[in-house]
Image (cartoon, rainbow, N blue to C red):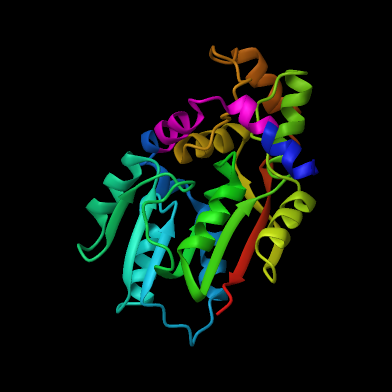
Amino acid sequence: MSAYSDLTAIARSEGGTGSKACIARGFGSASGTYDSASRLQKAMGDTMLARIPGNFEPTSILDLGCGTGWFTRKLANQYPNASITGADLASGMLQQAQARSPETIAWLNADAEQLPLADNSADLIFSNLMIQWSTRPETVLAECQRILKPGGTLAISTLLDGTLEELKQAWTKADPGQPHVNRFTHHADWQQLTSQQLPGSTLETATLTLPYDSPMALNRELKHLGAVFKGEERRRTITAPGRFKAMCTAYPKQGNGEIIASYRAGWLYWTKAT
C-alpha cells in the first residue's frame, strides 16, 4: 500500500459516514460570509484562470466545488458562448450562487465523487480548493476523467501539507496532543497519485503567505470560510479560553505585531488525450 493509500485510509476511518454532511453544513453555514473572507481562494483561482491557454474556447464548462459562484461567474464572463454548470455539495453555497448570478448558469447540488453528468460532456473542468476536503480524491479525479471530453482541460487547485504550519505549531504548544488544524496531503503523495492517474499532468506548487492582525483574526477568517478544523478527533466542547489565549501567545509575531499564515498551494493541470 502506498503512502497515499495509507493517508486516505486513515482519513476515511476518521471522517466517518457523517463527514460529507458535516462538510456540507459547515460550508453552507458560511455562505453569507465566504466571499468577504476568501482572499486565498480568489488568489489561487485567479492563478488557474491565467494558466488556461488564451486560444482555448470551451463550449461546456464545469466549475466543480463552485461555492458561491465567484469563479463560475468569472468563467461565464471569460467564455460567454459556453454552457456553464456550477456544482457543489453544500446547498447553502448554491443558494447564494444562484441569487448572485445570471440565469444562464446552471447549478447542481452533487457529490464530486459521484456526479450525475454524462461521459465526455465537458471541455473544461475548473475546481478551486475543493478536492482537499475529499477523503477519496482518487475518485474525484476519476470522475473528472470520465466527464472530460477528449482534448479537454482539467484545472484543480488544492492545499498541501505545510498549510497553516504556524497555527499548528502554536496549538501544539498550547494544547499538546490535541489536533486543532486540518491535515493536508503531502506533496510527494499528491504527486504520486496524480502522475499515476493523470499521465502527463503538471503539478505546480508555491507557498503563499497572508498577513493577519492577530491569531484571532486568522481564526475568524477560517470560520467565515467554513474551513475550521473538521477532523473527527476535534473537541466536542468549546475550546477553553485559557487554551486559546495560550495559542495566541505561542503564535510567532512579526515586528509590527501582525502574524503570517502560510498556505502550501498546489495547482494541477491536465489535458485529456484525443
Q: Main secondary structure of the magenta part?
A: helix
Give the quarter of the image for residue 216: top right
Q: Quadrant of residue 242?
A: top right
Whole-percent x and y of residue 167?
Answer: 69, 34
Q: Residue at x 55, y 13 (%)?
A: 236
**Is residue 214 positioned above or below 137 on the image?**
above
103 and 241: which one is in front? Answer: 103
Residue 253 seen from this side: no
Q: Which residues are magenta?
A: 10-27
Q: Is residue 39 left or right of residue 5?
A: left
Q: Quick check: 187 left or right of 59?
A: right
| Magenta span includes 227 | no
Q: Residue at x 25, y 53 (%)?
A: 98
* Residue 202 left/right relative to 218: right
The answer to whether residue 134 is visible is yes
Q: Residue at x 67, y 27 (%)?
A: 248
Q: Is residue 12 magenta?
A: yes
Picture coordinates of residue 243 (x, y %)? 67, 16
Q: What's the residue at 59%, 42% (across, down)?
A: 136
- Quadrant of the snapshot with the C terminus: bottom right
Quarter of the figure that contains the N terminus: top right
- The x, y position of residue 228, in whole percent, is 54, 32
Percent coordinates x, y for residue 118 in the rendering:
38, 61
Q: Residue furthest left?
A: 103
Count of numbered circles in the view: 0
